[in-house]
Image (spheres, helix red, strand yellow):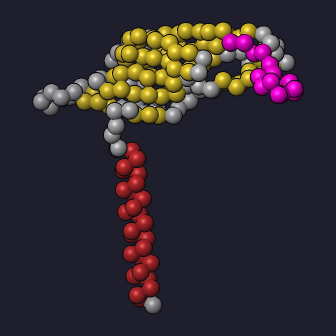
Amino acid sequence: MEKSKLAILIVIIVVVIVGIAGVLLLNNGSSDDNNTNTTNKNDSNKNISDNSTSKNKTVVTHDVSAVQEGPSAAKEGSTVTVKWTVTNKGSLSITNVKGISQYGDYNFGTIEPGQSKTTSFELSTQGPYDENESEKQESLFIGGFGLEYDFNGKHFKTNSNTIEIALN
């Protein structure tokens, strides 16, 4: 009976160690492309210390949001305006900021701390979208745009939210 309890204890310890190792690898794995799939906000607030030798190091963070907006409803066959807004809520500038989607790309350039930049484009809600489709579309789904930017010498990627426009 003691051997079976010992075996179970060893299995539990191994599972815990493997689980901890997996979490550490997922959370601390480093890459130049920190690809976060988020809605509205880059929740991977990275604290980056400077390389000075003083005891008091400055910690800088980046907090970037990518938001896509459009009307909640539109008439099928009309044109709607879709707006992209990128906000830098961090403590340093973000540079080479680019929005990328199937509808086109936009260069936001540099965005200073506390600053937002916005662009918009027109999109037709014409339907049906498939020549073989005879039923009326109920909604137009627009996938989120990809956002790429540089911060403190590293390149980051994130995604905005998706939107759904009800067609009537």
Q: Is residue 127 magenta?
A: yes
Viewer-side residue, 40 vs 129: 129
Instruction: Answer left or right for 24 relative to 39.
Output: left
* Residue at the extreme left: 53
| First to last magenta residue range | 123-138
Looking at the image, can residue 66 be seen? Answer: no
Judged from this view, the residue extending furthest toward the bottom is: 1
Q: Which residue occupies the foreground of this view, 44 or 59?
A: 44
| Residue 121 appears in view | yes
Asked if residue 16 lies left or right of residue 162, the reply is left
Question: How far across and down, in percent of the image, does residue 128 sit?
Answer: 81, 22
Q: Residue at x 29, y 23 (%)?
A: 152
Name the image quarter holding residue 85. top right
Task: Tell me the quarter of the image containing the C terminus.
Answer: top right
Principal SS element in the magenta part? Answer: loop
Residue 70, magenta (yes or no): no
Give the image location of residue 139, x and y in percent. Answer: 77, 25
Task: Say if 64 sits above or below 36 in the image.
Answer: above
